[in-house]
């Protein structure tokens, strides 16, 4: 476990170093490195497949492209006169994307460039549908949210023939995103998905429609979070906690749901 944590610290430092562009740091919020996603990206390398240098570069690449996508997501201005900080946020997202291509070019891995580029295309298509509120049901809306949150990891796992882990990891990443959306909505009254949920509830004839009556929106979040949690727990029950690689799935679960005893109880 200590070796694993050391490797995680090394990767995190590499990502932070790549992100440390002094000019951007003056004007935009420091990008957050998602610990859960970082652990998820490390899972295919529990057994030595590549050199440490290659492992660090591949994980850094996938982390950077996700940060680039998340950075673009923070741009909310819809008028023609976009504020300077919003413009810089867009540029920062583009800069982080460029870093990802640079690392893959160093690795000379055309296959991974194609895989992650396809993932970015799919994520952006799902974001457009979400922003324009084109979903016909809450179920299809949640499917898009899941795609947005998990597509990079799915393509990454496929490239390293690690698809068997994706169903569990995707449930955890999806639940984490909804927990974040719910928290944002409860704290500020706003969340990327809240308006779309409200619109769908209204379209389906539910009287509890408006955003100022947030209980129905929270109920939708809770329903899908609970469903993802239950599905993840069922998958965890089939895994042996005695094996180090399997313990990491329990650790991921704990990180998402802040449950410090699941691994021991499992």
Image (spheres, rainbow, N blue to C red):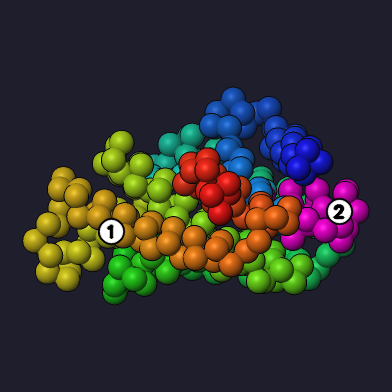
Give the side of residue 235 with respect to residue 191, left or right: right
- Judged from this view, the residue extending furthest toward the left is 207
Q: CA distance from mark 1 to mark 2?
A: 41 Å
- Judged from this view, the residue extending furthest toward the right is 51
In the rendered image, residue 116, in percent from the top left (x then y), is placed at 67, 64
In the rendered image, residue 36, in percent from the top left (x then y), is placed at 59, 47
Q: Nearer the viewer, mark 1 or mark 2?
A: 1
Q: Which residue is nearer to you in this view: 122 or 141?
A: 141
Asked if residue 136 shows in the view, the reply is yes
Q: Which residue occupies 22% across, 58% down?
A: 198
In the rendered image, residue 176, in percent from the top left (x then y), is placed at 47, 51
Q: Can you tell which quarter of the image residue 33 is in?
A: top right
User: Badge 1: how crowded within 10 Å, few (<14), some, or many (20+)?
Assistant: some
Judged from the image, the secondary structure of the residue bearing numbered disc 1 is helix
Asked if residue 65 shows in the view, the reply is no
Q: Which residue occupies 78% across, 56% down?
A: 46
Q: Which residue is mark 1?
A: 220
Q: Can you tell which quarter of the image residue 1 is in?
A: top right
Q: Which residue is nearer to you in this view: 30 or 59?
A: 59
Q: Which residue occupies 38% across, 63% down?
A: 227
Q: Which residue occupies 75% across, 72% down?
A: 161
Count the marks: how many?
Answer: 2
Q: Which residues are magenta?
A: 44-63
- Judged from this view, the residue extending furthest toward the top is 26
Q: Which residue is mark 2?
A: 54
Report if residue 45 lies within the magenta region: yes
In the rendered image, residue 173, in percent from the top left (x then y), is placed at 52, 56
User: Badge 2: how crowded within 10 Å, few (<14), some, or many (20+)?
Assistant: few
The rendered magenta stretch, by its main secondary structure, is classed as helix
């Amino acid at each position: 476990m200590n070796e694993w944590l050391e490797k995680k610290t090394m990767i995190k430092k590499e990502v932070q170093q790549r992100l440390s562009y002094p000019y951007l740091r003056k004007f935009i919020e420091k990008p957050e490195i998602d610990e859960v996603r970082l652990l998820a990206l490390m899972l295919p390398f529990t057994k030595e497949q590549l050199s440490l240098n290659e492992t660090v570069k591949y994980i850094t690449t996938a982390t950077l492209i996700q940060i680039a996508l998340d950075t673009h997501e923070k741009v909310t201005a819809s008028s023609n006169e976009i504020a300077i900080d919003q413009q810089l946020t867009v540029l920062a997202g583009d800069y982080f994307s460029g870093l990802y291509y640079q690392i893959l070019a160093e690795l000379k891995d055309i296959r991974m460039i194609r895989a992650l580029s396809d993932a970015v295309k799919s994520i952006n298509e799902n974001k457009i549908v979400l922003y324009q509120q084109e979903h016909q049901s809450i179920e299809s809306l949640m499917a898009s949210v899941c795609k947005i949150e998990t597509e990079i990891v799915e393509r990454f796992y496929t490239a390293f023939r690690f698809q068997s882990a994706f169903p569990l990891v995707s449930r955890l990443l999806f639940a984490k995103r909804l927990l974040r959306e719910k928290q944002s909505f409860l704290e500020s009254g706003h969340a990327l998905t809240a308006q779309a949920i409200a619109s769908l509830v209204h379209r389906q004839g539910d009287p509890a429609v408006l955003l100022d009556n947030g209980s129905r929106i929270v109920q939708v979040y809770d329903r899908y979070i609970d469903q993802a949690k239950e599905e993840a727990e069922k998958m965890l029950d089939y895994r042996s906690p005695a094996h180090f690689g399997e313990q990491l799935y329990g650790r991921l679960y704990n990180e998402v749901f802040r449950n410090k005893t699941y691994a021991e109880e499992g």
